[in-house]
Image: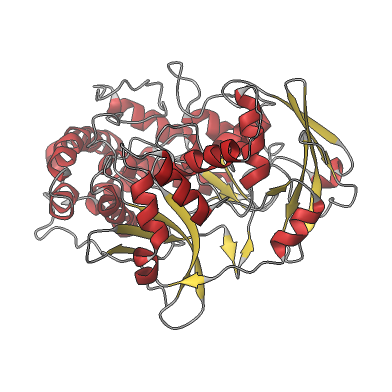
């Protein structure tokens, strides 16, 4: 095949099958569904493959989205410090690849490494390459082995600010075309051995000097969400620090079941596909757009097919947004929400990436998505936040008493969160605790307004404060 074409396969139903053919030409990417793909999950959750089998869908290549977003998610983000981006760039240079535009680079990286990532889509240069890939089993590791493995040490070396070409070359030799995950933190997708036998497909984050103690805080945030009790399908996880200080956070992948991929795509991809490419931004770049209300609208639209239970998913989105406010996670953009399952069976996915980020000077945003008619500016806590919360709750289909009940659970679950943050992250926890305190006061005001009572009527925080678990459900 030419370097302007590729094939997309999926193993979602066990036996790997071809989904279709990708062609890149003249600033556009075309995908033609295989004639026999009508029973498979589509390139996007909004695609009805029974109707699209044998047909072509087309996407414009733009600066913001050189590739269709569901495929762009398989390419490392364009960030200077992203390890996999640097590794793939080094491999292209070493192999003497001649690339022209930025879109050409994205395409080359997609064909080189766009497989075994999040979700069910695998991209290959040819059908022969697909057959070779599916015929190679992957190994399992314990957490201790992973922390001790040379790959993790090479990752830390290669992501250092002073990393040189030799360090990149070393890690390129070890991890080669590893699957990519969106985001700033170094990540690996691996199979971890359970203590009692068997394996867990996991996403493993590796601690970074740029974000000290963030993995301990993310682990704490998972605990707070668990205390709130809104997510019954919370993933198993393990926070691990080796004897020489290598920190890992391993979280079970819910896009895998018995080793098989489950279709999963970000809310951004779903909105992009459902709007025929009109929504191009992953967060509220231009004031109020896109907003969380835009996502709510598509959840309710049966033509989009992204939610089999829109009201339950709206409810879940409301509570997650409130928990994000109360734990300092303003990084709630459209890539950090996703839909799990194929069209007609899809639901809002379990929680992922709830890391508090407001303690870092580059990430002080209260919310990267607008809601309730409020646009959030960097670091500023809008005085109208209580009104925005009430308006957002109404948009989510909740009565005032329902809003009050959910806010009460969120506030109760995060009693003592600031203090706990100081304990698990002594270097940055105090900053986080101070920044969420003002948010908490405004959420309490929203609770009082929804409950129809004076703010003084709110019970004092429990003494002692809630106990936050440290490891989550057992690997076994």
Q: Position of residue 214 (x, y in %)?
A: 27, 47
The residue sitting at 45% across, 51% down in the picture is 170
Nearest the eye: 124 or 340 = 124
Residue 382 relative to residue 313: left or right:
left
Q: Position of residue 431 (x, y in %)?
A: 15, 38
Report the front residue among 61 and 169: 169
How far across and how far down the image is residue 178, in percent? 55, 52
Residue in the foreground of this view, choosing between 76 and 358: 76
**Looking at the picture, how far across and down is residue 387, in whole percent?**
32, 26
Image quadrant where one finds the N terminus: top right
Q: Residue furthest left?
A: 463
Q: Is 295 rendered above or below residue 225? A: above
Q: Nearer the viewer, residue 20 or 267?
A: 20
Q: Is residue 239 visible?
A: yes
User: For the point 34% across and 50% down, which residue is it?
Assistant: 156
Quadrant for residue 402, please give it.
top left
Residue extending farthest top = 286
């Amino acid at each position: 095949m030419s370097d302007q074409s590729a094939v997309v396969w999926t193993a979602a139903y066990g036996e790997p099958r071809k989904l279709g053919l990708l062609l890149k030409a003249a600033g556009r990417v075309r995908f033609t569904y295989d004639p026999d793909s009508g029973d498979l999950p589509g390139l996007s959750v909004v695609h009805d493959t029974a109707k699209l089998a044998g047909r072509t869908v087309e996407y414009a290549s733009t600066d913001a989205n050189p590739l269709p977003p569901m495929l762009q998610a398989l390419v490392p983000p364009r960030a200077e410090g992203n390890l996999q981006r640097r590794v793939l760039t080094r491999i292209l240079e070493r192999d003497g690849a001649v690339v022209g535009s930025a879109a050409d680079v994205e395409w080359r990286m997609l064909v080189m490494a766009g497989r075994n990532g999040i979700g069910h889509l695998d991209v290959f240069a040819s059908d022969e390459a697909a057959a070779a890939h599916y015929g190679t089993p992957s190994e399992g590791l314990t957490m201790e082995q992973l922390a001790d493995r040379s790959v993790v040490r090479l990752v830390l070396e290669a992501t250092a600010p002073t990393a040189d070409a030799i360090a990149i070359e070393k890690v390129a030799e070890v991890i080669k075309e590893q699957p990519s995950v969106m985001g700033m933190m170094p990540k690996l997708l691996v199979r971890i051995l359970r203590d009692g036998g068997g394996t867990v497909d996991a996403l493993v984050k590796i601690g970074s000097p740029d974000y000290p103690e963030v993995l301990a805080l993310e682990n704490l945030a998972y605990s707070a969400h668990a205390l709130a009790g809104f997510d019954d399908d919370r993933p198993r996880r393990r926070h691990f620090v080796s004897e020489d200080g290598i920190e890992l956070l391993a979280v079970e992948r819910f896009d895998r079941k018995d080793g098989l991929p489950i279709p999963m795509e970000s809310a951004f991809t779903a909105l992009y596909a459902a709007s025929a490419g009109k929504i191009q931004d992953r967060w509220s770049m231009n004031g109020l757009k896109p907003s969380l209300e835009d996502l709510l609208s598509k959840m309710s639209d049966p033509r989009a097919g992204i939610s089999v239970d829109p009201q339950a998913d709206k409810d879940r989105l409301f509570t997650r947004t409130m928990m994000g406010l109360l734990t300092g996670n303003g990084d709630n953009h459209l890539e950090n929400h996703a839909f799990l399952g194929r069209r007609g069976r899809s639901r809002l996915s379990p929680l992922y990436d709830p890391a508090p980020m407001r303690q870092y000077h580059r990430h002080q945003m209260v919310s990267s998505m607008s809601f309730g008619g409020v646009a959030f500016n960097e670091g500023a806590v809008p005085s109208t936040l209580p009104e925005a919360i009430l308006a957002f709750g109404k948009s989510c289909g909740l009565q005032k008493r329902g809003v009050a009940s959910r806010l009460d659970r969120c506030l109760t679950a995060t009693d003592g969160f600031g203090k706990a943050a100081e304990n698990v992250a002594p270097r940055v926890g105090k900053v986080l605790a101070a920044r969420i305190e003002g948010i908490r006061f405004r959420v309490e005001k929203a609770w009082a307004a929804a409950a129809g009572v004076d703010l003084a009527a709110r019970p004092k925080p429990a003494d002692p404060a809630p106990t936050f678990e440290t490891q989550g459900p057992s690997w076994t």
